[in-house]
Image (tube, rainbow, N blue to C red):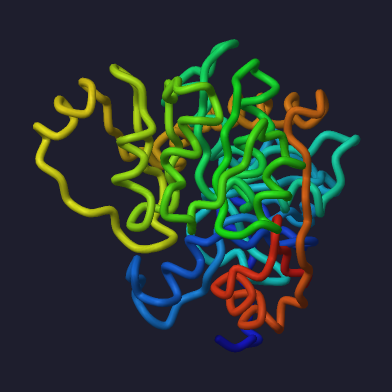
Amino acid sequence: MRLETVDLPAPAALEVQLRQTAVGFNYIDVYQRSGKYPLPSPTGLGHEATGVVEVLGEGVTDLKAGDRVVYMNAGVGAYAERRNVPAAKLVRIPDAISDEDAAAVFFKAMTAQYLVKKTHAVQPGDIVVVHAAAGGVGQILSGWAKALGATVIGTAGSAAKCEAARAAGCDVAVDYSQPDWVQQVIDATGGRKARVVYDSVAQHTFMGSLDCTAPFGMVVLYGAASGPAPAIEPELLNKKGCLFLTRPSVFPHNADPATFRANAKDVFDAMASGAVRASIGARFALADAAGAHRAAESRSVTGAILLLP
């Protein structure tokens, strides 16, 4: 990866030109850079950023110069100082939320939003398991599920990360590098299994996730930080308790502009109530994007990573 200077044209019709103020890093950036999720090359990277509207393209009526905005679904290319973005992909940032906090949580919180509100609508009294609970999405997901009244069992890969998971809202945190982590999760609730397991780790945790889930419960596989989940025969879901298994994604949940903005309001409301909190683990200059990727892949950062133009 290297920083290059290119000419940026005027925004097209229904686009605006942004001066970007903070760029959010997400683990999908690593997947795309490494080829796990291939992109045509050469390519930019990054899906989310905050910025200030500087130039309006023809036909843009719902934004004005000076508006602070955030996006997370305008195509790859957020690693930039300036960018032209379709106005329909932008949402204004409330005055009480800083650019850095918005960039630190927006993509991750929009992921958590559909997970706790749509994939499985978390209810008071639910037992919820959140894998990688010390990570960017994991911390937000844990805190939001707790605010909705769930008992939240987090898992993480070290004692220090388990402590971060508890600080994020988990009632109990279990180190999934331990061979008996599944039993520890079940014991933490007095033998009751989870109504839903949110699994973004996949290869190392997936089979255990099935064992943590109560009959008729749901396993939500929404990432693959340790590699793809092993293939299973559908009959195994029956044997494990008539389980539901799904593999959702944030982008289809926000493809419609009106739905996207409604979901974003849900996120901002959750931030205002304290259910979602920004936790910034590291800041890198945009020119040192490679350093951000190294830090993420080494799993040495707890919380969100920002790139600052």
Residue 166 image point, x, y percent: 71, 41
Query: From the viewer's perspective, is residue 252 above or below residue 289?
Result: above
Front-most of 209 and 104?
A: 209
Which residue occupies 45% across, 75% down? 33
Q: Quadrant of residue 38?
A: bottom left
> What residue sits 23% from the left and 22% below the top?
241
Q: Name the foreground residue: 54 vs 205.
A: 205
**Residue 214: x, y in percent?**
35, 22
Q: Quadrant of the N terminus?
A: bottom right
Front residue (pair 12, 135): 135
Does the rendering let one see residue 14? no
Query: Can you name the residue that lies furthest to the top here?
Result: 124
The quadrant holding residue 179 is bottom left
In the image, residue 66 above or below residue 142: below
**Total of numbered circles in the picture?**
0
Residue 146, percent across and down? 66, 25
Residue at position x 34%, y 66% in the image: 37
Residue 43 visible to an observer of this rendering: yes
In-image side of 21 versus 223 (left or right): right
Q: Is residue 243 above or below residue 161?
A: above
Vertical order, 294 against 206 (above or below): below
Residue 270: % across, % down: 73, 26
Please state if 41 lies on the left or on the right of 104 as rendered: left
Q: Quadrant of the C terminus?
A: bottom right
